[in-house]
Image: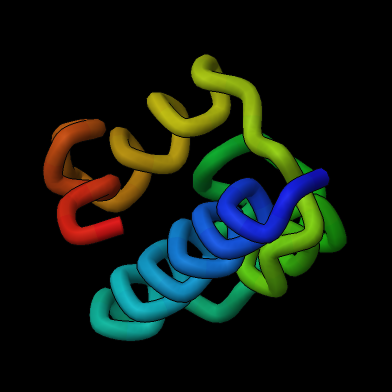
């Protein structure tokens, strides 16, 4: 993957982590809320996962934000 692709994955992961923590979720409780595996959430937050659009929507809904708010600034 090129550097730009890696960078957007890292920035998206940082955004998810920031929002998750601001709402008081542990990684485990957030994964449960999303219906996703904790290790998958960890991979997203570390910028190691290229997240499917469907899962971006699931994450946004679990955080109570729109997809556009979730991806704002990345």
**In this orientation, does residue 70 appear?**
yes
Residue in the picture at 64% in, 54% down: 31
Residue 55 in percent (x, y) is at: 56, 28
Residue in the picture at 70% in, 73% down: 46
Q: Quadrant of the C terminus?
A: bottom left
The vertical placement of 56 against 15, above or below, is: above
Q: Indicate left or right for 24 with 25 as reference.
A: left
The quadrant in which residue 36 appears is top right
Q: How is the image coloured?
A: rainbow
Residue in the picture at 86% in, 61% down: 39
The vertical placement of 45 against 55, above or below, is: below
The vertical placement of 58 against 14, above or below, is: above
Identity of the residue furthest to the top in this view: 54
Q: Indicate left or right for 64 with 30 as reference.
A: left
Residue 57 in percent (x, y) is at: 39, 25
The quadrant in which residue 50 appears is top right
The quadrant in which residue 61 appears is top left
Give the number of callouts.
0
Q: Which is nearer the eye, 3 or 22?
A: 3
Residue 20 in percent (x, y) is at: 39, 71
Residue 1 in percent (x, y) is at: 82, 45
The vertical placement of 1 against 27, above or below, is: above
Residue in the picture at 51% in, 47% down: 33
**In this orientation, does residue 29 appear?**
no
Q: Which is nearer the eye, 8 or 43?
A: 8
Q: Which is nearer the eye, 27 or 74?
A: 74
């Amino acid at each position: 993957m090129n550097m730009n692709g890696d960078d957007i994955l890292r920035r998206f992961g940082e955004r998810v982590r920031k929002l998750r923590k601001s709402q008081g979720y542990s990684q485990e409780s957030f994964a449960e809320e999303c219906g996703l595996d904790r290790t998958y959430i960890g991979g997203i937050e570390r910028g190691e996962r290229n997240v499917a659009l469907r899962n971006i929507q699931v994450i946004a809904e679990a955080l109570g934000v729109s997809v556009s708010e979730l991806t704002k600034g990345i």
